[in-house]
Structures are given as C-alpha cells and as structure tokens.
Image (cartoon, rainbow, N blue to C red):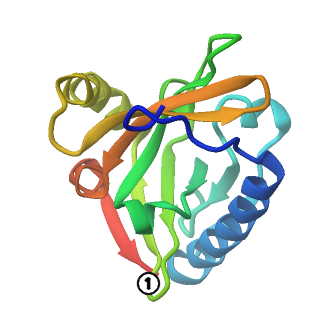
Amino acid sequence: MRDGRETPIHRYAESARRGAAGEARVLAHLHDAHGWRCEPAGMAEQWRGVDLRATLPDGSTCRVEVKCDARAQQTHRAFVETVSNDVTGRPGWAHTCEADWLLYFVPGPNDDVLYWLRPADIRRALPTWEYAADAGGWGVRRVAARNEGYRTLGLAVALAELERIAVRVESL
C-alpha cells in the first residue's frame, strides 16, 4: 500500500530487464573508474544477496549486490525491501544481504547516481526509518508492491537519507 493505495501489479520480467541494464552500467563503472574485475555470483550466493564477486586492483576481493531503482529519480525515494514475500514471510534484502557492498543505482535523464552502502548500515537504520514511517515522519513511508499472489513490503526512504548513511555517492 502506498499512501493508502495499492500499487499496480509488479511485472518481474520487465523489472529484471531494467535491472540488468542498470547492473551492466554499474559493472562498466566499477571496471573503468575503479579497476574492479567482476564476475557473477553463483545461485546460492544470489539467494543471500550477492550478485557479483569483485577482484580489486590490489588483489583483494569483495562481494557486491546491485539494486537498480528506475523510479527513484522521479520519486526522490529509494525502495528498501523489508519483506520479499508477505505470504511466505521471506525477509527482504535489507535483512538478508550478505554482500560487502550494496550499490544502489539510480539512473536519471542527465546523471546516474550510485550510492555505496554497507548492508550493516542499512540494518542499523531500519528501526529509525520504521519508526519515522509509522509516525508519519521525515521522508520515510511504508509501501507495498503487488506481485502475482503476494506483496513485497518495504520502506520508501528519501534519497537524502540514503545519502546520509552512504559511504560514498558517485555521479556516473
């Protein structure tokens, strides 16, 4: 539910197509700007919130999750998923992501923005964001995305708040 209204049914295939394009943009940036070599994570890792395994120029490695939010540029809010499936009760990525970095990508008409986040920082912020959403407070609200037979629940968090907890924000 968004401001008392249900959202249109989420089309997974369409969303996955947009997400793949965003992930490709982020991969190119990680390679070109930072010298990272990335490869897709296995299915078991993907279920734990890891999209990519990256090797950095110094030889160290890290695990990366990429979220692409094409609507955030218009709404000025990021969708932070707290419940992936309200029927099964599967927790959302805010609780389950095991990556070292969660890269939240917001494509825009002029500039794309990449928020470098630590999943632990998101989890630390959740109680404050949930309290603010329930109190009708500063730039956070509860939302639900309808899918076929279930809903995905989360928080619509102001991009300024996401920027506040980000380690780094880059314009691409």
Residue 167 located left or right of residue 72: left
Of residues 75 and 161, the one nearer the viewer is 75
The image quarter containing residue 145 is: top right
Residue at horizontal 77 percent and vertical 23 percent from the top: 149
Residue 108, percent from left and from top: 48, 78
Could you tell me which secondary element the residue under label 1 belongs to? Answer: loop
Residue at horizontal 42 percent and vertical 67 percent from the top: 74
- Can residue 62 be spotted in the picture? no
- How would you rate the neighbour count of disc 1 (Cα within 10 Å): few for under 14, some for 14-19, many for 20 or more? few
The image quarter containing residue 47 is: top right
Q: Residue furthest bottom?
A: 110
Residue 106 vertical position relative to residue 148 in the rendered view, above or below = below
Q: Residue furthest front?
A: 5
- Can residue 53 be spotted in the picture? yes
Residue at horizontal 47 percent and vertical 31 percent from the top: 154
Residue 148, percent from left and from top: 79, 31
Residue 35, percent from left and from top: 58, 76
Residue 92 located left or right of residue 50: left
Residue 132, percent from left and from top: 19, 29
Q: How many marks?
A: 1
Residue 76 vertical position relative to residue 150 in the rendered view, above or below = below
Of residues 110 and 52, the one nearer the viewer is 110
Of residues 83 and 25, the one nearer the viewer is 83
Q: Which residue is mark 1?
A: 111
Residue at horizontal 46 percent and vertical 82 percent from the top: 172
Indicate the amino acid at tag 1. Answer: Asp
